[in-house]
Image (tube, coloured by chain):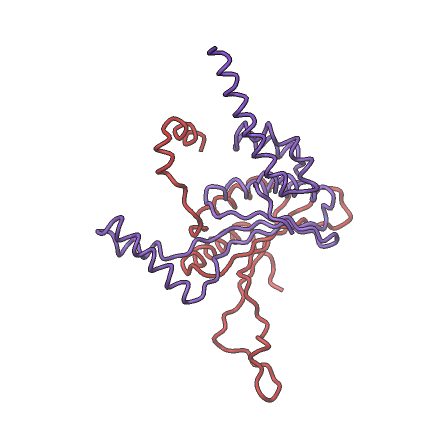
């Protein structure tokens, strides 16, 4: 098992993974969050955040060779996965940066449609001011 | 496993689920590109190239390069393995990402439904918030219907406004 990264390392790895996926325009990035509960203290739990590209290191059962052994192809890429633990007190700061990095990295999503807004005029101006 | 119609509904129901099962519920965010067969890819790039040439013939090579990528999607999933409850929400708009992730942070910090609703009022819009509390009760049983209900509510409000205006003029 790979030890948890620090929050800062996690951000750089995540930005890297997101930009690579967006560049290839292929594949996925899975991010999951869950509380780490030790069952002893009543303090608000730390949050465990995991990121992976959804690949697997397990050999493909279809590529089984004749003698019954499963051989892993050398060309198959290794699974990317990393995780970090966020203290309850750091949550807000962490998620602000987390949101920024996701927004910057997920370039495959639809951009904001500016043309419609310009046509609207007034409404567009107030919305832009809010954002 | 329902896809919820609005991010607001997703966040509210996720908050309820987290409240009920705080230690086993997890939230997954998936950023993914659609899987395409080679044929579908060729078709899409062809049609986009056509569009590019008609709209801006000068910048064709650059625009086909950027546009040839398929549109990715972001799926949020709140899952509780013990009860088997799954809540999902999918979007493909970059504009929503920032708000969604910060909301996830609030959920992680143990925010309840009420505090999420308040935060939504600041970002989202006043009209939605007026409708949200009554709708949210229905949501627990039938999320699909609730989407329609919200739409009707907004329409109804619009209608009222028009009627009032008419009376005033007469």
Identified at 78% across, 48% down, the residue is: A40
Residue B27 vertical position relative to residue B7 in the rendered view, above or below: below
Name the quadrant containing residue A21: bottom left
Residue reaching furthest to the left: B58
Task: Please state the horizontal and vertical placement of residue A112, each as a whole percent of the image.
Answer: 41, 41
Task: Please state the horizontal and vertical placement of residue A49, each as a whole percent of the image.
Answer: 60, 52
Residue reaching furthest to the front: B170
Name the quadrant containing residue B104: top right
Identified at 63% across, 64% down, the residue is: A1
Residue reaching furthest to the bottom: A67
Q: Nearer the viewer, residue A33 or B10?
A: B10
Q: Can see residue A36?
A: no
Q: Can see residue B56?
A: yes
Check the rendered structure and report the hue given to chain A: red
Residue reaching furthest to the right: A40
User: How many marks on residues?
Assistant: 0
Residue A4 vertical position relative to residue B148 in the rendered view, above or below: below
Check the rendered structure and report the hue given to chain B: purple
Q: Nearer the viewer, residue B113 or B52?
A: B52
Give the left or right position of residue B77, taking residue A104 as reference. right
Task: Please state the horizontal and vertical placement of residue A23, each as a whole percent of the image.
Answer: 40, 58
Task: Please state the horizontal and vertical placement of residue B76, each as a whole percent of the image.
Answer: 58, 49
Residue B145 vertical position relative to residue B122 in the rendered view, above or below: below
């Amino acid at each position: 098992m790979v030890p948890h990264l620090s929050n800062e390392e996690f951000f750089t790895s995540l930005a890297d993974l997101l930009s690579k996926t967006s560049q290839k325009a292929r594949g996925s990035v899975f991010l999951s969050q869950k509380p780490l509960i030790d069952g002893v203290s009543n303090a608000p739990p730390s949050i465990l955040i995991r990121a992976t590209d959804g690949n697997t290191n397990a050999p493909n059962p279809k590529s089984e060779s004749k003698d019954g052994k499963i051989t892993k192809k050398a060309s198959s890429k290794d699974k990317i996965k990393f995780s970090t633990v966020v203290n309850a007190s750091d949550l807000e700061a962490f998620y602000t940066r987390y949101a920024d990095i996701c927004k910057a990295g997920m370039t495959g999503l639809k951009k904001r449609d500016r043309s419609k807004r310009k046509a609207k005029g007034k409404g567009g101006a107030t919305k832009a001011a809010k954002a | 496993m329902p896809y919820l119609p609005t991010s607001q509904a997703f966040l509210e129901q996720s908050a309820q689920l987290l409240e009920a099962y705080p230690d086993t519920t997890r939230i997954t965010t998936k950023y993914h590109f659609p899987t395409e067969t080679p044929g579908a890819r060729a078709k899409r790039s062809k049609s986009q190239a056509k569009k590019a040439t008609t709209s801006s013939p000068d910048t064709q090579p650059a625009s086909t390069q950027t546009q040839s990528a398929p549109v990715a999607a972001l799926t949020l999933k709140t899952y509780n393995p013990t009860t088997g409850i799954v809540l999902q929400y999918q979007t493909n708009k970059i504009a929503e990402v920032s708000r969604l992730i910060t909301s996830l942070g609030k959920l992680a910090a143990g925010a309840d439904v009420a505090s999420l609703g308040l935060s939504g009022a600041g970002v989202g819009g006043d009209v939605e918030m007026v409708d949200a509390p009554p709708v949210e009760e229905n949501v627990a049983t039938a999320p699909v219907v609730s989407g329609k209900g919200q739409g009707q509510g907004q329409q109804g409000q619009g209608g009222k406004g028009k009627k009032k205006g008419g009376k005033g003029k007469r």
